[in-house]
Image (cartoon, rainbow, N blue to C red):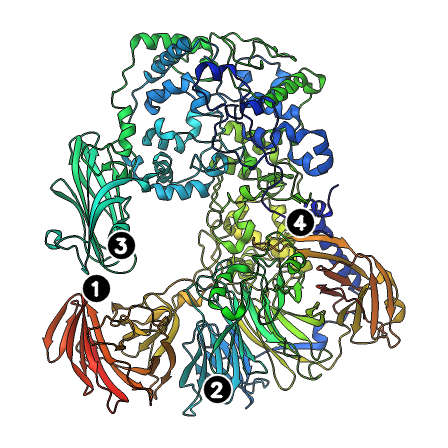
Amino acid sequence: MRHTPVGTPIETIRRQRPAATETTRAADSGERPGSAGRRLASIGWYLIAVGCLVGSQAAAAPLVAGYERFGRPFFQAESVVESAGVAANASSLSQIESGLLLAGELGCMNCHTVSPDSRRHLLPKTGPVLDKIGERTRPEWLVAYLKNPHAVRPGTTMPDLLAGLPADRRDQVATAIAHYLSATAAFDEVAGASADGVAEQGNGLYDRSGCRVCHGPQDPAASRLADQIPLGDLASKWSPRALDEFLKNPLAIRPAGRMPALPLDDGQRRHIVASLLMPKTLQQVVAFNGQAWHCNVQSLPAFESLGPPFATGPVTGFNVQGLAGRGEGIAVRLEGFFHAPTAGTYRFYLSSDDGSRLTVGETVVIDHDGVHPSDERKGEIDLTAGTHLLRLDFFQAGGGWDLKLDVSVPGKVRQSALAWVTPTRDGTPLAGDQQAKNAVPFVPDAALVAQGREAFAKVGCANCHQLSAADGVAVGSQLASPALTASPKGAGGCMAPGGPAAGVPFYGLDDGQRQSLAAAFTWLASADARLEPTRERAIDRSLTALNCYGCHVRDGRGGTIPAVAMTDEDGEPILRETSRDQLFASIVQELGDEGRLPPTLTGVGDKLRPEFLSEVLLKGGRDRRLTMPTLMPQWSPELAEPLAQMLAQDPHTDVPIPQLVDYTATDIHDRARELVGSKGLGCIKCHSFGGDKGQSLGVIDMTRMPKRLRHEWFLAYVANPQQFRPGTRMPASWPDGKAFFPTVLDGTAAGQIEAVWRYVSQGKPRPPIGLGTEPIELVPTDRPVLYRNFIDGGGPRAIGVGYPGSVNLAWDAEALRTALVWRGPFIDARRHWSGRGEGWQPPLGDGVFTPDAGPCVETLTAADAVWPEKTARERGARFRGYSLDAAGQPTFAWSLGNLTVRESFVPHTGNDAPGLRRTIEITQASGKPPAGQVTFRAAKSDKVEELGDGWLRIDGLWRVRASGTDLGPLERQPADGKTELRYRVNLSGGQSATIVEELSW
Amino acid sequence: MVSTRLRNALCIYALAISVAWLSSAASMAAEKPAKPSEADAYTIKPLKIPPDAFVEVGALEWIPDGRLAVASRRGEIWMVSDPAGDEPRWQRFAHGLHEVLGLAWRDGWLYVTQRPEVSRLRDADGDGVADVFETVADGWGVSGDYHEYAFGSKFDADGNIWIVLCLTGSFDSKVPFRGWAMRVTPDGKTIPTTSGVRSPGGIGFDAAGNVLYTDNQGPWNGTCALKHLVPGDFVGHPGGFKWYDLAPEMGEKPAEPKSGSRMADEVKRIPRLRPPAILFPYDLMGKSAAGVVCDTSDGKFGPFAGQVFVSDQSHSMLMRCSLETIEGVMQGACFVFREGFSSGSLALQFAPDGSLYVGGTNRGWGSRGAGDFALERLTWTGKTPFEIRAMRAVPGGFELEFTEAVDAATAADVTNYSARGFTYIYQAEYGSPVVDEAPCPVERAVPSADGMRVTVSLGNIREGMIHELKAPGVRSATGVGLLHDTGWYTLNRIPKAR
């Protein structure tokens, strides 16, 4: 039997949205989207062509997600339906249904009267509320949009009401309406906290939270699914604050509710705002001229005294490594001119690894000096409008580097300073291009406002849009439209093929949409339309119109399964759409698709309580947030309540509820608590409990279940999860109805499951055993305790040693070094000895320092040679293990080249500072001559102080003294801006040497 | 034409329900009063563990002096004297090791596979506590991800320890040789041996010395499996392919498998891809295949000498495997053997007396046995259970070998059997539903003259499928029904002749 992969990318059948079929308008205005492909599209058919995804070229026909995905006529072809059998029926809409969907989404009923019989087959949709629209929408955008809606927002469902007018007249009326709308309130550029988002984080949230499901990728050039509605240039329309307000509650402006609200917190939402408004090509901008020096410093140097730079020139983005030619041991000065658009307070955000300093004019705004990992500091400065010299100093000692400067310009979203800086004083910053457009403040013209008001009522805007005048009374419409009839006007009406006609809304319908609408109107006039839609039909219509199917499956439609039966090159059906599947990310990979894909809606009314159905639709979903990044959004009550009521009527699983009459409530709760806990069935290994994730995977909180689930469904599901969700990871904890704990309560599966239900239904159930874990502190008593695990700072092969007397160390068996030394308590093993043991455990005590940067003994070609930089493993060095002496103290052994080194430690725990004595024994393989000068490195430090008696204080933190008859005098070797403390080692008899190193702190 | 697969996928609910119904119907039919239990033949006895010991057993080894070495995930090794007695004596031999998942004894040294290395431990001063910890081999990386487990075998005939290295997480290999099987030679070399490992649960040998390890459901593993490790091969998960660059002796990396395909198809396309010897049907057997051990007791453990036993961590059970090699490819059947262990069953060790020690942990992954940890001894009572001892592929069907002679009348009645074939998708996504499911009509059942074997002829036998064969109605000559009436055979190759 020939197998064909399931879930391969769709390569064979590919769809494209056709462009609109009109040609006259394109000819007359010349400002429509490119006419390429229009000829093809005028065939009114679907292309079997390259690419299943729609490219970036704009298509002017209205874009209704459900129609694009399920309603396109290609997939209604009789032959396809027949050949694909049940799959096609489950996935595609009939022409009548797709027409009804369009009639609702295009707002036909807002102008045309329809019979009450017809009305119940159409979901109404009004346009956005335009009260105070001037406050949130840039006037320039309004002008451009009203002049040509289909060009500015390709796919908009708003008809062009002015399309039939001569070009000059059209522009005049559009401008007048724009003035009228802008006069409702002054555009508010003030951003405040709304500007605090970070675009990079917003990008991730946009992709993962669900925005991308409906809107596709933010990058306008990236390919998108046919049903994804592009966002257009949001920065030209919105201020940060307005967009933030809108996303917080889209229903206030768009009561039709097709755009729901995602339950994001303020910070997350503002990150998304930042990403939506941020120019997409910033990292390629050349904003600074730079100078770079190669030098090893531990803090910002005096740049003036560094001498001639290694390199100078323009810098792309913040790529100082590109300028300096390396990423370590560098100091860089970037200079550019900051263009302040207005006078005001500017807040800068500087993050760097290692140190940096921001100077604007003569003022140091942020000092972020020193060696440190990447973190952010803020600073503010009051600036006048105009250009200001901006200087960014930076250095990087070793390891990874990072440099980034963001700025909040008054009234703007926080964004990279690259948008506001140019290398020369007379340059135009990226943000300035946009700024220039807004340079002349918009002033509504009283005469135009009056004309606009008149036009607003006359041409039909008021049919769809609420706009309350200053007196609070909504503007009424004066547009007279005929009633909808079975055969709409072939010519002259909204649906007329060809170009727009004067006084008629122009939707840019393509032939497929026109045919669907015609079929729907014919059907609405028939006797069939007088019947109520069935419940399933009505649910399906809602899920389609609201694009619930973007995420969810119900009865074979929606989710990541294909819109229609699709086949691969061998004619085998494709069961999953890869490009859609990739919209859903994962937090807990072990949960597979269950943790990643939004839950099925098949039988959802059986599963969820009616109250919870309403709640989750109205308030959004939060129960899966620990495992699923995609968020369930919030819908308007007008849409949510009827949908919840219909879903609640799904056929109900009915099982008897055990009474457990022989047991007291306390008994039931206590025994169920045992079952749920780690000593029982271990439900909490996967499920959270009472708001505590504990050691679980974070799967839905058990105490939320009685609020979410129908009691009977819970009993039936837990008894046999596979029956409800084939392949689920939820185990059958009572396989074949058998109880693992036959002595608990009545010993029956049903009785025990009911007990669990009652236990988790209590107001505040006692947490089950094993939910949280106590610290597991390892305490050395008479002998050292060893702990081999992932110790933070000691590497993944760390061997912790806790000595009696509160002296501890971590030996790094990969880098072959004494990685950490500390005092006080040794270590808490809880992290690694509970749950799966993930992550890094830092020392429990304090006074932590790193005495040893790598193998402390090397054979150097010369006494002043550079200490080798490659890893120990790369140079063939190897950990050889350890032995324990009679007191249980370890001696670690390692080898490098001809040398074998043994390091043993004796703690010193007197009344003075704690200390360790490290004895280092070096032996050379016999018969092999020395390959160079054997050298011991006691420390590599920023600051060395001599304390007398051979003691040296390192970095002000700890003290070291090296001694031994085989040791030469101390030699200070500069290295990477630090000082290495080196000693030559004389192997006695050419074979061995012993060094004693005392550490104290 | 609507393909079978499409219909299957769309009817997945119906299938699952019917499977559940079939199995419950079968168990109801078998629930006669005389039904023998697993405990009649094999008893589980927990070992007494000192109250202060927290022994999440990761590995076990028998020491020639009669002690049992027990390694814990917390990095301790305990030596248990008189483990079969009522009062075993526990002494802590070592501590501070890193999640030990392999123990092997040789020449006075205890070889320990811990996360980053194979070490060997010795008690030099004779006080019963190890004082020498030598690093034997560390030719792989650890990044700090908990998922990067290392399971180690006993010694093979050449003195090598085989190591299977879990990937970094389920998909990636961040440091060298995660997702590979390696051999550690007696002189301490680490040799890259087989790629394609995902998330092992244990490693061992069959009676002939073939190396077998368990891998778990996840990406490229539609369900848990017992896999045969052969040097140079690729066993399924391409996540570690980049390390072919560090393993010139392994040649070029194999072609990438095609996600969404079937193992049987990809094996034809990728010559070095070796299919799993046994797929354990998800949830019908276990959910988390773990330790591997071969019954080398020569009958002291009952009628299954030479067979391989695999523990399942999630179901706290032992599964039994009958293996054979057809056209150079290992395959065979699995059966439920013994359920009811006290924690998630992991480590397995036979003792010279023919008893099997089963060590468990359920930390991080839940198990039916609710104990945090367990160490139990499984012994044969001497009573032979009526079981399908082995299931072998023959042209046109399967030969069942029983532990006792069958009743010829019930054994020859085709209505006493049922069979179906199915498999899992071989894909990059996590796990897989059951796919390609189709019934196999039982055409004939012919008992052998001695009644120890029955050849069952089936229709619709398909290469690459798991074939489930149930024999609920077959009785032994003494009138007893089967203790476990189902075998699942992974049919990589259909034999051309008997």
Location of the N terminus of chain B by quadrant is: top right
Residue where numbered disc 3 is placed: A325
Q: Quadrant of residue A840?
A: bottom left
Among numbered discs 1 and 4, the one appearing first in the sequence: 4
**Circle 4 — which element?**
loop
Indicate whether A801 appears above or below A505.
Answer: below
The answer to whether residue A789 is seen in the rendering is yes
Circles 3 and 2 on the same subunit: no
Location of the C terminus of chain B by quadrant is: bottom right
Indicate whether A919 appears above or below B455.
Answer: below
Circles 2 and 4 on the same subunit: no
Residue where numbered disc 2 is placed: B109
Q: Nearer the viewer, mark 4 or mark 3?
A: 3
Disc 4 sits on a residue from what chain? A
Give me the residue at 15% from left, 76% from top: A971
Residue where numbered disc 4 is placed: A4
Indicate whether A446 appears above or below B234.
Answer: above
**Circle 3 — which element?**
loop
Give me the residue at 57% from left, 12% from top: A113
Question: Answer yes or no: do the residues labelled 1 and 4 have beta carbons within 8 Å?
Answer: no
Question: Answer yes or no: do the residues labelled 3 and 1 have beta carbons within 8 Å?
Answer: no
Disc 1 sits on a residue from what chain? A
Q: Nearer the viewer, mark 2 or mark 1?
A: 1
Task: From the top left corner, tell me how far across and down residue A920 is, in percent.
Answer: 27, 83
Residue where numbered disc 1 is placed: A976
